Amino acid sequence: MNSFDMLALVLIILSGIITYSLRFGGLLIGNMLSKHKFIENLIKALPGTLLLSFIFPSIVTEGIAGVISALSTGIIAKKTNNVLIALLVGMFIIIIFRNIL
Amino acid sequence: MKSNFIKGFSATIPVGLSVCAYGLVLGVLAYSKGVTFFQLFAMDLITFAGSAQLLMVELWRDPLPFSEILFAVFAINLRYLLIGASLTPLFKNTSIFEKMALMHLVADENWAVTMSRLKEEKITPYFLFGGGICLVIFWLLSTLGGHTFGFIISDPYSVGLDFVIIIIFTALVANFYDGKDSIFPWIVAAVFSYFSFLFIPGKWYIVTGGLTGALVYSFQKYFKEDKK
């Protein structure tokens, strides 16, 4: 193993340690803080707001097709509780927009 | 315990398939950047975070930009601190060893599937872990496959596979909609994430949007209870 490969492996391991610390640290922090009502509400709201923040910019960037597809997916998922159907409809709309319209 | 593992594994398969699209892209890119098969394999198992790995591969060169890569990994994965915190209710009544062992394979995808299932039924952290094992299998197959056959596939994005994950998350996010209480926090989250997306490089938009939205929800509850 030459020095570049050696350094590369160290770098990969350090990246892993950083990522794991964040994952595990978050759980520990949450455990310590969940006794407070305010923090408890914060933790309760986080999944929804995090997911929304994940998808929203991509949907807007995709344009009108993204908005129509996301709205239909969300509404169908909420009404029917069937993620697969919602997914198929959403993808169908995107593919139609990208290839035909 | 065992059935939770299997339930989690199978519930994550559809998301896992869409993760393959990312994995292929990463594998092809890694191949073109000179990342070896073994290095990619090590990254998959040790870091196990798609966007961070994509970034590492993009920054990969000789000599290795050590601090640049480490800071980027930290920044891009900071959202895991919040994801970890949001998992507190799921890990109630588990030992510290279970917590340590089961947290490594937490990714955006199995976390989202788990949290949305947690709203419907009582599940254990092994559901999350089953999802993680499912993802790591798809992840290894697709990234290493992309690396091996990197010279054939020229542009996996063109098929529109990049949007699958967004659609899946959209279907999942609908589960978290709690009626009136969610409206204002969600608007704030959307606005903050979009502006961070436009003006701050990296994946900060997930953290800023998620945190501000959740804070608004907490304050909203706080002031409502004050009035009673």
Image (cartoon, coloured by chain):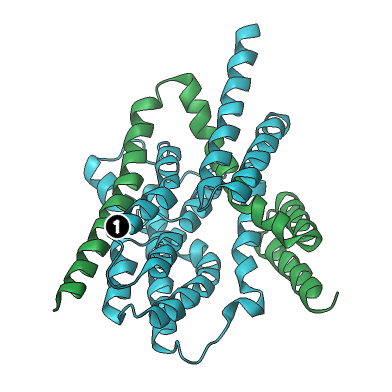
Relative depth, front residue between A91 and B146: B146
Q: Quadrant of residue B60?
A: bottom left
Q: Which residue is mark 1?
A: A15
Furthest residue toward front = B63
**In the image, B47: left or right of B10?**
left
Residue B1, x across and y down, in percent = 35, 53
**In the image, B87: left or right of B18?**
left
**In the image, B78: left or right of B215?**
left
Q: Is residue B158 above or below residue B203?
A: below
Q: Quadrant of residue B95?
A: top left
Residue B126 visible within the image: no
Residue A4, x across and y down, in percent = 20, 73
Q: Is residue B70 above or below residue B18?
A: above
- Give the residue drawn at x 31%, y 81%: B37
Q: Of the residues shown, which amino acid type is indicated by label 1?
A: Ser
The quadrant the N terminus of chain A occupies is: bottom left
Question: How busy is the neighbourhood of tag 1: few (under 14 within 10 Å), some, or many (20 plus)?
Answer: many
Colour seen for chain A:
green
Residue B167, x across and y down, in percent = 66, 61
Colour seen for chain B:
cyan
Q: How many marks are shown on the rendered structure?
A: 1
- Give the residue drawn at x 60%, y 34%: B213
- Give the residue drawn at x 28%, y 63%: B46
Secondary structure beneath label 1: helix
The quadrant the C terminus of chain A occupies is: bottom right
Residue B200 visible within the image: yes
Q: Is residue A18 above or below residue B12?
A: above
Residue A82, x across and y down, in percent = 68, 58
**In the image, B203: left or right of B175?**
left
Q: Is residue A24 above or below residue A35?
A: below
- Give the residue drawn at x 41%, y 45%: B78
| Chain for numbered disc 1 | A
